[in-house]
Amino acid sequence: MADARIEHLIHCSDEKFWTVFFDVEYNQKLFLDELRFESWKLVSLDDKGDRIERVVDVVPRLGDLPGPLKKLVEGGAGYRERDVFDKKTKRMTLKVEPSVLQGKLTISGVMHTEPVGEAQCRRIYETSIVAKVFGIGGMIESRILDDVKKSYDKAAAFTNRWVREH
């Protein structure tokens, strides 16, 4: 199991952050242009009054992988992300359903924001990754966690630019 808490300072209020976070144009630019994912597709976005439910299909670029991991993802390694955002608590639960290793790979998390003054907030993402694959589970967990951290670092910088420019 690999767990992490990833924090970034975002240069806008938490209200503004969540408005930006659910913006389709922002997400397309973030995932396709900034993070260079192969695809990002909004499947559904439903405002239920007290919560927002979102489903996206994503295919990241994998880059160089060690031999054992490369063999596992020969057919691609996309995922479906299911998000539920509670408007009152400003907390979102995330569940990732990978296209490979179904039943053997679990990725979940909680993202929330905390105000830091009037014009900033701290975005906090706590994630847990479990790969039940004999002999290489730890390698899979480490690689995914490293990729998640790098993506969140880039996303924070991009979000701050986006807020400043829009």
Image: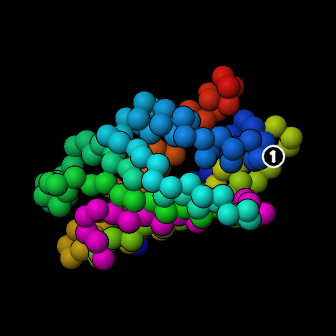
Q: Is residue 5 visible?
A: no
In percent of width and height, residue 45 lies at 56, 54
> Which residue is nearer to you in this view: 70 or 138?
70
In percent of width and height, residue 48 lies at 67, 63
Q: Quadrant of residue 110?
A: bottom right
Please report the residue visible at 30 percent of the width from the left and 77 percent of the height from the top: 103
Of all residues, the one furthest to the top in this rendering is 165
Please report the residue visible at 31 percent of the width from the left and 68 percent of the height from the top: 138
Quarter that holds the C terminus: top right
Of all residues, the one furthest to the right in this rendering is 118
Q: Quadrant of residue 51?
A: bottom right
100 shown above or below 123? below
36 shown above or below 86? above
> Which residue is nearer to you in this view: 41 or 109?
41
| Callout 1: SS | loop
User: Which residue range is magenta in the image?
Assistant: 87-103
107 shown above or below 20? below
In percent of width and height, residue 137 lies at 28, 70
Q: Is residue 90 magenta?
A: yes
Please report the residue visible at 31 percent of the width from the left and 54 percent of the height from the top: 78
In percent of width and height, residue 31 lies at 44, 39
Residue 76 located left or right of residue 159: left
Residue 22 located left or right of residue 134: right
Residue 79 located left or right of residue 11: left
**Residue that numbered label 1 is attached to:** 116
